[in-house]
Amino acid sequence: MKHLLPVSLRVNGEPYDLLIPPWRTLLEVLRENLSLTGAKRSCQEGQCGTCTVLIDRKPINSCLYLAVEAQDKEILTIEGLARSAEVLHPLQRAFAERGAIQCGFCTPGLILAAKAFLEENPNPSEDEIRRAVVGHLCRCTGYFQIIEAILAAAREMAGKGAQVGH
């Protein structure tokens, strides 16, 4: 117990008070302490994007971010994105409808990174989307469906229906 620190986290709008070793990453705490397994463990080097979560609306690699650093910040994981199981976020719906989900391993990180990107650039071009997802590895889709899904979600989120946003 002498190597444990009290940590208060706010994840998906819910407060959590934990005792954790100071070296635990946010990814480890999310997955192992809170059973929020949407963020995936893969490269452990911040190179693949599968562990992406939002902290104060900015995408971070939770495999490199210490949980103690996340105190007093708002953490959003894929589990907290949809309003309910029946009402998906436009990005989740667009990924599903456009086949941007194959194995699904990269999907949570891509969706959260896209959410942060679209909040800063609600009317992106395809090239801007490609640059925004550069740090996310997907081995299944070839990215075409992912780009298409993000464009579709951007249109929906901006209230533009079927218009192309370039």
Image: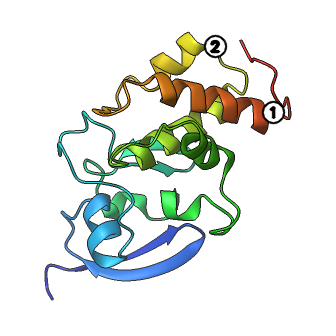
**Left or right: where does residue 35 sit relative to residue 144?**
left
Check disc 2 and report its element: helix, strand or loop.
Answer: loop
Q: Is residue 143 above or below residue 98?
A: above
Q: Is residue 18 above or below residue 77?
A: below
**Left or right: where does residue 118 sit relative to residue 136?**
right
Kindly indicate the quadrant of the structure image that contains residue 66. bottom left
Q: Which mark is residue 78?
A: none
Q: Residue furthest left?
A: 2
Check disc 1 and report its element: helix, strand or loop.
Answer: loop
Q: Amino acid at mark 1?
A: Ala
Q: Is residue 98 above or below residue 75?
A: above
Q: Nearer the viewer, residue 151 or 24?
A: 151
Cβ atoms under marks 2 and 1 closer than 8 Å: no
Q: Nearer the viewer, residue 3 or 156?
A: 156
Quarter of the picture containing the C terminus is: top right
Quarter of the picture containing the N terminus is: bottom left
Disc 1 designates what residue? 158
Q: Is residue 77 visible?
A: no
